Amino acid sequence: MSKTKYYFDSDNLEFVPIKNTLGNRIYRLSLFLISSVIFGAFITVILFNTDFVDTPKEIVQEREIDNYELQLKVLNKKLEQVESTLANIEKRDNNLYRAYFEASPIPEDQRKAGFGGINRYDYLEGFESSDLIVNTTERLDILTKELVIQSKSLDEIELLAKNKESLLSSIPSIQPVNSSDLRRMASGYGYRIDPFTKARRMHFGMDFSAPRGTEIYATGDGTVTRADSRAAGFGKHVRIDHGFGYVTIYAHLNSFKVVKGDKVKRGEPIGTVGSTGRSVAPHLHYEIVKDGVKINPINFYSGSLSPAEFEELVKIASQENQSLD
């Protein structure tokens, strides 16, 4: 049972009971509801404009941000693996591939160079995860640059490898006459007795004594630049340009098996032994020219002789005897 409320009547100096009418009740209820709504709205505005309470949209956004940060961290882990793999390739590139093909290594500061000048990542700053985003973006840019440098290096290595293969097949490396066809190795590179003047003079090639008609072979891949008898003293002779500064000369031939402009392979017949030109007996006079300078052919028979045969050839070639031309 509700208590009866009174008010003091100052005129009559007495307490008079307050009548609780329906209108009073409605008035008080309305006042309470209005006050509650205003207070609730005020509190809601306060809470939504502070960090104490997140709106549903903010909660979704935070979850998305957390997910993006997680993906960026996973991406950075993968970047570490890619960087490690690329570093290994770069190390082999400098210390193995480029060293083998006698190419200068790419400097480390060139491989790892960043991007100077203005701040190219300023548009990524000012956000909650800016440091992580900027760091990841920069790593991707540097990695992309390193990959471009490495790709160009591998293209260069591929070209060097092709040139190396061509060089190895072009360098004169076999004996121009089979050992089984030789009567003897008549004279080597160096000072020898001239068979006509009996004077001591420089002999710029090696003389291989063999029966007339014995086949002569190209000692390396190349292009025939001469096959004629217009060189003084050489008689019928063949010249082959092997590229890379190498030229070989085959003199005193009996006959030709090639003509000027022919492409020849190592071991391909190019003519036969004879005694044309300034010669005293059937033999092949063989010379090697490197960058315009005549050099000793004795160092270029690695592809056709056994160690014992090569040792015997060196011994004979070193003797200062009479040449055949």
Image (cartoon, rainbow, N blue to C red):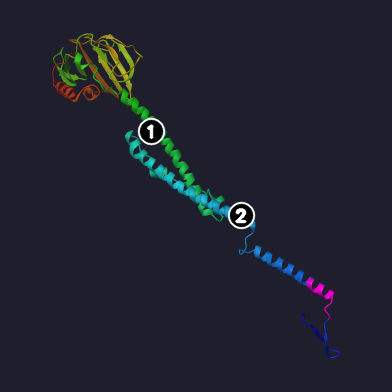
Q: Earlier in the sequence, mark 2 or mark 1?
A: 2
Above or below 163: residue 70: below
Q: Is residue 57 left or right of residue 73?
A: right
Is 21 one of the magenta-colored residues? yes
Image point (35%, 36%), residue name: 97
Q: Amino acid at mark 1?
A: Ile
Above or below 117: residue 291: above
SS for dot 2: helix
Residue 220 image offset from top left, x and y in percent:
30, 20
Can the viewer see residue 115? no
Residue 325 image offset from top left, x and y in percent:
19, 13
Q: Amino acid at mark 2?
A: Val
Tag 2–tag 1 contact (CB < 8 Å): no
Q: Quadrant of the N terminus?
A: bottom right
Label 2 packing within 10 angstroms: few (<14), some (14-19), many (20+): few
Image point (40%, 43%), residue name: 85
Q: Is residue 106 left or right of residue 323?
A: right
Q: Measure how far apart labels 2 and 1 are at the Cα level.
A: 52 Å
Residue 319 image offset from top left, x and y in percent:
13, 21
Above or below 296: residue 123: below
Residue at which label 1 appears: 157
Which residues fall within the magenta stretch?
Answer: 19-29
Q: Is residue 202 left or right of residue 113?
A: left
Q: Which mark is residue 277?
A: none
Residue 249 image offset from top left, x and y in percent:
27, 17
Specify the farthest residue to the right: 11
Residue at which label 2 appears: 60
